[in-house]
Amino acid sequence: MHPAGDRRFSVRHLLDPPALQGTFAEDVRRGLSAEPKFLQPKYFYDALGSHLFEAICELPEYYLTGAERQILATQGDAIAAALPSPVRAVELGSGSAVKTRHLLAAILRRQGSLTFVPLDISPGVLERSARELVEAYPGLRVEALAADFDGGLRALAEDGAGRRAGEHLAILFLGSTIGNLDPPAARRLLHRVRSLLDPGDVFLLGTDLKKDERILLPAYDDALGVTAAFNKNLLLRINRELGGDFDLDRFAHRVRYDRRRGRIEMHLESLVDQTVRLRQLDFSVRFAAGETIHTESSYKYDSEQIADLARRTGFRPAGAWYDRDRRFAVSLLETAGVDKLPA
Ligand SMILES: C[S@@+](CC[C@H](N)C(=O)[O-])C[C@H]1O[C@@H](n2cnc3c(N)ncnc32)[C@H](O)[C@@H]1O
């Protein structure tokens, strides 16, 4: 690591491994005891899961990454020009931040220097991407936050996201990660983001748009089976961290589109009647053949839904950029209504 890079790079760790382990155990017990069974998608992102997600982003079927990359690469300067100045950028669920680079580069062209605060639950990928970014952009300072959304937003609220006098805030939420939240949870998250913002600050939101199921379904069920591996890795994680005895060959990756709710669902379907034991929880769970664990939803939006979400959470839609085929949208939301909502 170049010493000049070190001075421009820090990681704050807010993830407490023993506490995390306890929460994971409780959430798994609760999800597998529920009817129907579910597991939360944030648990996909252990070290292997994060690598598998990066592989998914390379798949031809997973058009989302390419579409959003096209928006940021070809319209990054226009997006940067629409942001307040000078700006400090925070990204929720930044992951590898590969696409974000285009926007960071455009902001740097405009204001010369920039502090970027990537926040992610997966510390390995966060740290790697932060190091790569400071190496690539001499004007960039990175203050990474290894945290989940809840703890990360709390920390940002406590220290005002570290902003300096005169600096505005742009909070980025890209990659259609908002799609993993059901509508009430999406509204709760936007409310919390809104409570961090002052008038003149902005929120930049990447959403996947509604489209034909023939395009949607393969994006979550690719021919190579990478998404299936990503999904089943949850079971592998439970086996490793909670002493589970899931036999991965007895579960299958399933994807369906719920048109009424406008969401893709990923499930793990038990192929036989079976009982799985989680030794560390002293807990056994029975599966009937055909029963599933719902592991992820991915909500698809249209412009009205984005505008509605914005209005209900103290924002005003102030611009949107699309890829050539209008598969994906990056929307700029300005603060509106009340200046500060309760946290
Ligand atoms: C769908 S991926 C998107 C990654 C990246 N923004 C992109 O566009 O490629 C979701 C990202 O959010 C992170 N993540 C998921 N749930 C999270 C949570 N509850 N708190 C913090 N980060 C989370 C994951 O580690 C992952 O990097």
Image: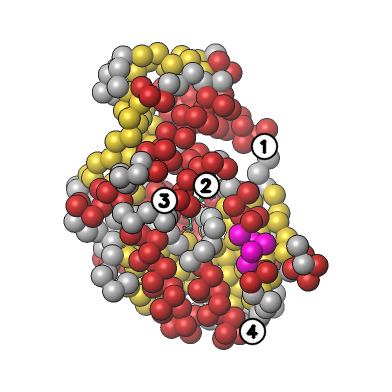
The residue pinned by badge 4 equals 112
CA separation, marks 1 and 2? 17 Å
Magenta region, main secondary structure? helix
- Say whether disc 4 or disc 1 marks the residue closer to the N-terminus: 1
CA separation, marks 1 and 3? 27 Å
CA separation, marks 4 and 3? 33 Å
Q: Which residue sits furthest front?
A: 224
What amino acid is at disc 3? Ile
The residue pinned by badge 2 equals 50
- Quadrant housing residue 251: top left
Residue 171 on the magenta span: no
CA separation, marks 3 and 2? 10 Å
Mark 2 Cα-neighbour bin, 10 Å: few <14, some 14–19, many ≥20: many
At 35% from the left edge and 60% from the top edge, which residue is drawn? 64
Magenta extent: 129-133
- Say whether disc 3 or disc 2 marks the residue closer to the N-terminus: 2
